[in-house]
Image: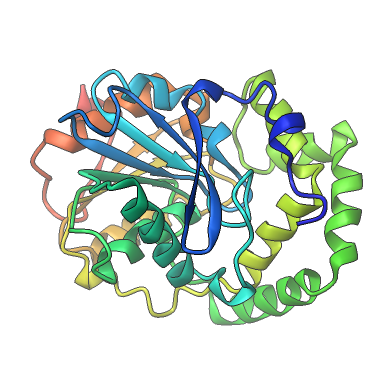
Amino acid sequence: MIGAPDWGRDGRDWPNRSASRFVLAGGLRWHVQVMGPGLAARRPVILLLHGMGASTHSWRDLAPILAERFTVVAPDLPGHGFTGHPAPTLMTSDGMARSVAAMLKVLGVQPAMVVGHSAGAAVAARLMLLHLIAPVPLVSLNGALSPMPQHQGALYSVMARLLSNSPATAWIFALQARQEKTVDRLLAATGSRIDADGRKFYARLMGRPGHVGGALRMMARWNLDDLDLTRLDAPVTLIVGDKDGMVPPEDATRVAARLPDGRVVLLPGLGHLAHEEEPGLVARLIEEAAIMDQPERGQPMTLADCA
């Protein structure tokens, strides 16, 4: 796509670049990072799915920590980062899940755990609800798992669709994003404070119309009304930054109440990008979720409970 991030230019100093590879699957050219002992090793595989508008760079510090104990597989989702753009009709959570499943099949991977950030958590849930992967522990990092209120959702969808249908919109946004104040304002809205490297890579992606257009197309077709979490036959840990400015933190408790096996871990002082603010802490919580018995359904936990 014209204006998409270019690996030779934009990926020259990409975080964990040595772990990157490109594979063809489901009609797309995927950018995937594989870290740890490799896919041939007998270590459990953790699949990391980033959120809307992000990419593999958001795992830059968390993935290497997890790779000490697991094999980590982290793709750029369709239309994001250095992965190709599918047909617009596949930019739904259902379509994303099917595309990810095709990529996993080419890699020959069966995840033992899935970690999804924001919208990536919904894609992870779809993977299991559609029986595209076996039910495995799911860790939702500030997950966007609830439908919007009806009046907000309808307006949001219509506006996003109108924006995504205009190629000029992505170019205008990308030009604005090349101004520091625009990127700083967008990152401040997450409630997180991230390091200079994180800001640099977000700014780089936001300055590419192809990446912006992919996020807009995903936004335009995002619908979770039929995401029936009561059928999710897997333990779910909902890690929530209490300063999240994108997904209301209180949503996690309501989501946990709908899950057959769910718990909430509250992270005081952290925002929507908590895994970028405190990767060591989040890695520890993920490792614990991989092995611990789940507490009583829907009961919130604090950091003290995990000590």
In the image, 32 versus 178, the foreground residue is 32
* Total marks in image: 0
Q: Quadrant of the N terminus?
A: bottom right
Where does the image place residue 203, in percent across and percent down from the top left?
A: 76, 35
* Rendered residue at 58%/53% (across/down): 52
Q: Is residue 139 visible?
A: no
Render colour scheme = rainbow
Where does the image place residue 221, in percent across and percent down from the top left?
A: 59, 74
In the image, 284 versus 200, the foreground residue is 200
Splitting the image into 4 quarters, where does residue 73 fall? top left
In the image, 256 versus 12, the foreground residue is 12
Where does the image place residue 75, in percent across and percent down from the top left?
A: 47, 44
Query: Furthest residue to the left?
Result: 293
* Rendered residue at 63%/25% (across/down): 14
Q: Is residue 82 visible?
A: yes
Rendered view: 209 above or below 273: below
* Rendered residue at 79%/74% (across/down): 165
Judge from the rendering whether residue 261 lies leftward or rightward of residue 285; answer left or right. left
Judge from the rendering whether residue 51 lies leftward or rightward of residue 231; answer left or right. right
Q: Quadrant of the C terminus?
A: top left
Judge from the rendering whether residue 71 lies leftward or rightward of residue 217; answer left or right. left
In the image, 197 versus 230, the foreground residue is 197
Splitting the image into 4 quarters, where does residue 214 fall? bottom right
Where does the image place residue 162, in percent across and percent down from the top left?
A: 79, 77
Rendered view: 184 above or below 237: above
Rendered view: 8 above or below 167: above
Rendered view: 293 above or below 249: above
